Image (cartoon, grey):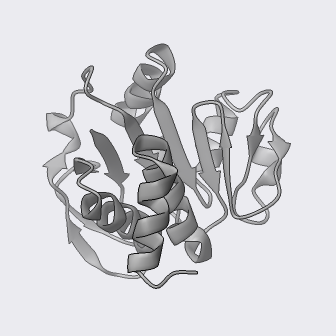
Amino acid sequence: MVYVFLADGFEEIEALTVVDLLRRCDIETVTVGIGREAIRGAHGILVQSDIADKDFAPAENTDMIVLPGGMPGTKNLEASAVVQSAIDFCVENEKYIAAICAAPSILGHRGLLDGHEALCYAGFEKQLEGAQIAEGKVCLSGKYITSRGPGTAIDFSLKIVEVLKSRQISTALAASLMYT
């Protein structure tokens, strides 16, 4: 089970690309709205999440949480006690955390990227406290998957599929999308 957290001001491409690609691969994916179910993205797109944060409870079947970027979405995610609790659960239970764009800063502020490689949106590198800034579009380091931004959303999503399913399934998905 993958939970994708949506907060007002989230980057729509980053969140919805993940949901779309994971569901194409039959990875159970649930969107969680911070504060309510209807969440407005950074570009004014209103998205109906599957559940509100008050109904979120991580369980052993949780494989990963996903933190999309965007502003002020990233700040709203970071301010959420539910998101912070979900991060704690993943760290304590060795589950994956995927964050893209500005959202890796949430992990950096908590010192979770110390000793890991990571990526983020240009200009946020100093907020990845303790991390070595990686090269490329997407980075897997330990249980953390990070990526640069909207333009890398497909690469980010394909890496999540690879980690949760296999490289073969990720490659086949990319081919089916005509993504090369």
Q: Is residue 76 visible?
A: no
The correct choice, above or below, for 11 with respect to 51 in the image is below
Q: Is residue 62 left or right of residue 133?
A: left
Residue at 60 percent of width and 70 percent of height: 152
Q: How many marks?
A: 0
In the image, 120 versus 20, the foreground residue is 20
Residue 169 appears in which quarter of the rendering? bottom left
Residue 136 appears in which quarter of the rendering? bottom right
Figure quadrant of the C terminus: bottom right
The correct choice, above or below, for 17 with respect to 162 in the image is below
In the image, 174 versus 113, the foreground residue is 174
Residue 110 in picture, x, y percent from top left = 64, 29
Residue at 80 percent of width and 52 percent of height: 125
The correct choice, above or below, for 133 with respect to 109 in the image is below
Figure quadrant of the N terminus: top left
Residue at 19 percent of width and 58 percent of height: 49
Residue 162 in picture, x, y percent from top left = 49, 50
Which residue is most to the top?
Answer: 92
Which residue is most to the bottom?
Answer: 178
Residue at 39 percent of width and 25 percent of height: 85
Residue 51 in picture, x, y percent from top left = 15, 48
The correct choice, above or below, for 63 with respect to 59 in the image is below
Q: Is residue 115 visible?
A: yes
Residue 36 in picture, x, y percent from top left = 18, 52
Q: Is residue 118 left or right of residue 69?
A: right
Q: Is residue 173 left or right of residue 149?
A: left
